Image (tube, helix red, strand yellow):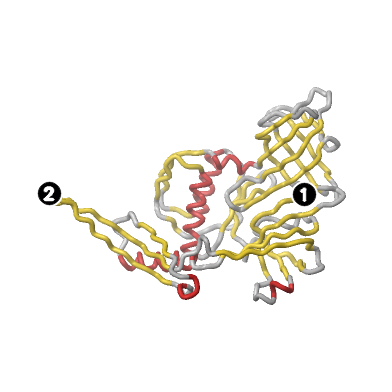
Amino acid sequence: MTCTQFIVGHRGSTDRWDVRDLATNVKLDTDDDFAAGTLTFDLLEVNEGFGPSNGDEVRFGWDNGKTFFGYIFKAGYTSDEVFSITAYDPMRYLKNQDTRVWPIGTLSQRFVTACQSVGIKYKVVTASKYKLPSKLSDGVSFFDMLQEDIEATQTGTGARFILRCNYDTVELVQTPTKALQYLVGDGTGITSWEYDRDIDDAYNVVKVVKTKQDKNGSATATAITSASASGSTISRWGKLQKVEKVTDDDTNLAQMKTKAAHLLRASNVEAKTMKLTVLGSMDYQLGVAFMLQVKSLVEMGLKPVCTVRKCTQNFDPTNWTTDLEVTW
């Protein structure tokens, strides 16, 4: 396995430089937590009229595949005459901020609008039909806007969507995206791992609250309406309560109870994450599911099918490895 394309060029220009023989320490990080894919690498300076600049395009291919397309955002330079480069894929432009009034619509519709607004290529791989209420997004990034919509869609439907970049195209896709047909585990492609469980962000009581103030002369009375949902983990974890405020006066008590139940379903869970290093493979992409079988974890009752949440490709021709963070 080796680098088969590594081109850096000025944006809007025909000037292109093949840097395959100059690049070292090449690493690609991807994360489904609303962050652009990041390619980092070092470049040895050569006296050929070339110096990487912020905004330059980067095209990288590994093993004849189209692996990364993006733009340089950081270009450091050291006394050793080495450039340290950080490039982001097109999803970086979803960090642009704006103020928007969103009408009632689906996650898919808002994703398309966001990508068009920042001028990047996009594709709806999996469409969502769930209707989201109208909202005001005031001076926040498109990442923040879409994160809120993805979380609301998951709360309402149980379906989990992510954003990922497929070379030069940002995609909206429901996970898991596909299942790999091979097993990773003890003695099978895995070199090291660590497993964590936590309830830091868990809640087993959700209280939905609506307040309304009525002014009567100089006095102000506040009426509070609430609905709660409780989970079965209180006896094991203690009471962990979350309050969700409802701002729509037209929301009735039945709707509040439904909202509380939906939020409880998403919050009353133990977060399980596992970090592992495996033999290098481009099959590991965000949202992909695969079979993971580690004997000591199986004995703990861990389910064998996990999904990739973070992926780091360490592109070393002599020791290519992939670092993964997976969840269930």
Residue 217 is marked as: 2
Q: What residue lies at 27% left-to-right and 61% top-to-bottom?
A: 224
Residue 104 relative to residue 118: left or right: left
Q: Which residue is mark 1?
A: 314
Query: Alpha-carbon distance for marks 2 and 1?
Result: 69 Å
Mark nearer the N terminus (2 vs 1): 2
Q: Position of residue 19 (x, y in %)?
A: 81, 35
Type of amino acid under label 2: Gly
Residue 17 relative to residue 142: left or right: right
Q: Secondary structure at mark 2?
A: loop
Type of amino acid under label 1: Asn
Q: Is residue 76 above or below residue 121?
A: above
State the residue in front, 83 or 291.
Answer: 83
Q: What residue lies at 67% left-to-right and 62% top-to-bottom?
A: 274
State the residue in front, 51 or 254.
Answer: 51
Q: Position of residue 217 (x, y in %)?
A: 12, 49
Mark 2 Cα shell of 10 Å, populated few (<14), some (14-19), many (≥20):
few
Q: Secondary structure at mark 1?
A: strand
Q: Position of residue 64 (x, y in %)?
A: 82, 48
